Amino acid sequence: MTSASSPQLRRPGVLPVRPEHAGIEPYGAPQIDVPVLLNVNENPYPPGEAVVATLARDVAAAARGLNRYPDRDFLALREDLADYLATESGVRVAPQQLWAANGSNEVMLHLLQAFGGPGRTALSFAPTYSMYPEYARDTSTRWVTGRRADDFTLSPEAAAATVREQAPSVVLLASPNNPTGTALTPETVAAVCEAALEVPVPLEDGRTASAVVVVDEAYGEFRRAGTPSALELLESYPNLAVSRTMSKAFALAGARVGYLAAAPALVDALRVVRLPYHLSAVTQAVARAALAHSGELLAQVDALRAERDATVAWLRARRHRGAPLEVAPSDANFVLFGRFEDRRAVWQGLLDRGVLIRVVGPEGWLRVSIGTPQEMVAFKDALVEVAGL
């Protein structure tokens, strides 16, 4: 019995979930404990002891001030990022041109919050990163895709024509592209930026603005020699933003640090939509400590590039049921390959042998992240056994 004053226990009813979220499963790649994890494009090499020592020291220093809010504009981190990009890409940007957040995922969400929304459109070119439509959905932005060519390239003419046809407020270009690994040419990026300048995005006061172009270079440090960064186009296009992450090349997937470079006015628009003090003092300390060791951390990138190129060559030399395997050229730390009549059966066969890769991309294709030499041997041995290569 309950008294009149005590609350009644009631069966939970239907929650008022937004219609666009109803029945949707949360995003996430399988997290399975197996000996060889090659499914989420992680760097297989953990930070070295010197890096760990600096991280521990700097996080301890930050911990002593955790009773205070962090620097909400993280000026010191932005200065360090500017120095890093000048060294890595040869492009010097001002600290005011940089923005950071909890992974490049949050950077992308900030961009859609600032420039997307009801009545606006976000455009990309499929196949591409599966989170992009989720950013659009969560900001009530219409999502549309153009198509890449059969070899996953994107010509300047086709890209620009699609931008003019769809009239988006935001264009998302992944380069190198996930899941294909292909990089865009500077001509294609420039053509998209030019077309975006011509697209009139209506504003409530009757004026019009230009569309924003975002080049997602999450895997930029892995690009092959001679493949330029879109950072080189920043000075020419005030509507361009170039996003990076410290998850991959810096081996900091667990730290959740992403950032972008853009014109100061674009960065200021992101400052409006961010949550207060969104980048913790600990995150800032970790990122700055890692940047101080960028030479050591990026030393493994060359080894991963070499392992990637060797994996591409090995896969292209294999035959499946009489036909050569198809392998997409890669500027990233992963390789997309196929085609298989039943790719899930191949995936399961690898998993049964302790190797986890990813079912992603067009039908018939699989993606393998580049691991250590020992992990790649395990992958190749398992694939030969499962697929009869």
Image (spheres, rainbow, N blue to C red):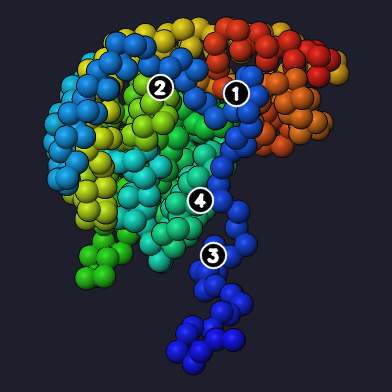
Nearer the camera: disc 3 or disc 2: 2
Q: Which residue is mark 4?
A: 133
Query: What kind of element bears circle 4?
Result: helix
Give the Cα distance between marks 3 and 4.
Answer: 12 Å
Pick the residue in front: 249 or 223. Answer: 249
Query: What kind of element bears circle 3?
Result: helix
Corner quadrant of residue 23: bottom right
Q: Earlier in the sequence, mark 1 or mark 4?
A: 1
Q: Is residue 338 above or below residue 379?
A: below
Q: Which residue is mark 1?
A: 37
Q: Position of residue 282 (x, y in %)?
A: 25, 35
Corner quadrant of residue 348: top right
Crowding around mark 4 (Cα neighbors within 10 Å: few <14, some 14 to 19, many 20+) is some
Question: Residue 347: which disc?
Answer: none
Q: Earlier in the sequence, mark 3 or mark 2?
A: 3
Nearer the camera: disc 1 or disc 4: 1
Q: Which residue is mark 2?
A: 251
Give amino acid for label 3. Glu
Give amino acid for label 4. Pro
Say how many tags the image has.
Answer: 4
Q: Is residue 318 above or below residue 63?
A: above
Query: What kind of element bears circle 1?
Result: strand
Q: Position of residue 108 (x, y in %)?
A: 37, 45
